[in-house]
Image (cartoon, helix red, strand yellow):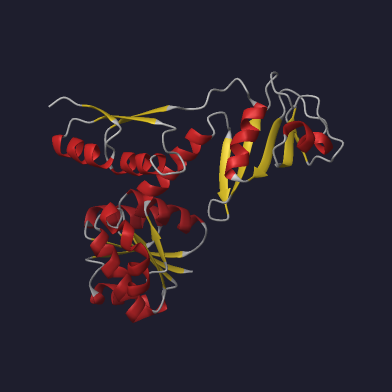
Amino acid sequence: MNIIIIGCGKIGTTLAEQLNNEGHNITLIDKNEKILRELAVNLDVLGINGNGAMLEVQKEADIKNADVLIAATGSDETNMLCCLLAKKEGHCQTIARIRNKEYEQEIEYLRNALGISYIINPDKMCAHEIVRLLRFPSALEIETFYKGRVDMVKIKISEKSVLCGVALRDLQKKGGVPALICIIECRGKAMIPSGETILEAGDVVSFIAKPSDAAMFCRLCRPETRPNRSVFFIGGGKIANYCAGYLNTRRHKNRYQLKFLEINPDACAALAESFPDALLFTHF
C-alpha cells in the first residue's frame, strides 16, 4: 500500500519502521528537516519537509494515489485537519491520533463529520491495558476480542488450585465457571486438549471466557493470588486520569481505593474534582 505518515515523533517513527518492514511504500511528512532526513536515509523512504495540514504538501506526497494517511503529529487539531484534507482530496483511508480528553464525548461526531476512518488515542489504549492487568493480576497474557466482550487469558495453574486432577469434560461441574480451554502448555510442549485431558499443577492454560467469568476462572487457577484493592498513581496525567476513570465506573465502583501523588497544584485540583473519593498526596 501507499501510506503517508504525518509527524515523525515516537509513534510516527515506529509506524514507519514497522510498515516499511512489511513492504509498504512509505512517505513521511514533518517540519523537522533533520529528523526527516535521518529517517529517510535509515528507512529508505520518501521524506517531505513541510506542514502536513497544507494541501500543497499533501499533493507533493501524492495524496491522490495514497491508500492510507496517518496523522500522528503532537496536535490533535492538526491531525484532524490533515485527515479532512486527505479525505476530500485523495479519498483514502485516514487515521488520526487524538489524545485530548476534552474530545472524548465528541469522538463519534468528529469521525463522521471529518470522514476519519479510525481514531487512535495511545493514552487511552495504555490505560485499557493497565486496567486489564489489574483485573487479572495472576495472568501471563491477556487479549480482548469482540469489543471487550470476550477475553483470552493465559495463566499457570498452581498446586493449590481445585482444578488439579480434573478432566476437561468435568471442568464445568467442578469449577462452575463457563470457560473454554483452547491450549495447554505442559513441560515446554503445547497441545490442543480433548475432554479426556487432565489438568495438572504447572500447566499453562489459554482459555476464552466472558470478562466476569474469566476473572473467576483465574481465581480458580491461582486461589493464592489476592485481588487488587488499592491503586497508587505516581502522577496525575492523561493515562492516570483514563485509568482512574475506568476504575471509577459503576462496574468497578468501590472496588478500588484510588491514590494519587501529584506535585502540580492545578492537576491536583482537577483530580480532586473528578475523583472526590480518592486520596491525594502532594508537595507544593
In which quarter of the view is residue 153 placed?
Answer: top right
Tell how many labels.
0
Q: Nearer the viewer, residue 160 or 80?
A: 160
- Looking at the image, is 144 positioned above or below residue 96? above
- Placement of the C terminus among the 4 image quadrants: top left
Asked whether the viewer can see residue 95, the reply is yes
Q: Residue furthest left?
A: 284
Q: Would you say 126 lies left or right of 78 here? A: right
Q: Position of residue 141 (x, y in %)?
A: 58, 37
Q: Position of residue 177 (x, y in %)?
A: 69, 38
Q: Would you say 197 lies left or right of 14 here? A: right
Residue at 33%, 74% (x, y): give it: 113
Residue at 26%, 42% (x, y): give it: 274
Asked whether the viewer can see residue 70, the reply is no
- Looking at the image, is 153 positioned above or below residue 118? above
Residue at 56%, 40% (x, y): give it: 142
Q: Nearer the viewer, residue 127 or 88?
A: 127
In which quarter of the view is residue 181 placed?
Answer: top right
Residue at 23%, 53% (x, y): give it: 34
In which quarter of the view is residue 175 placed?
Answer: top right
- Looking at the image, is 166 positioned above or below residue 115? above
Q: Position of residue 38 (x, y in %)?
A: 31, 52
Q: Residue furthest right?
A: 196
Q: Would you say 226 lies left or right of 60 here? A: right
Q: Position of residue 202 (x, y in %)?
A: 71, 24
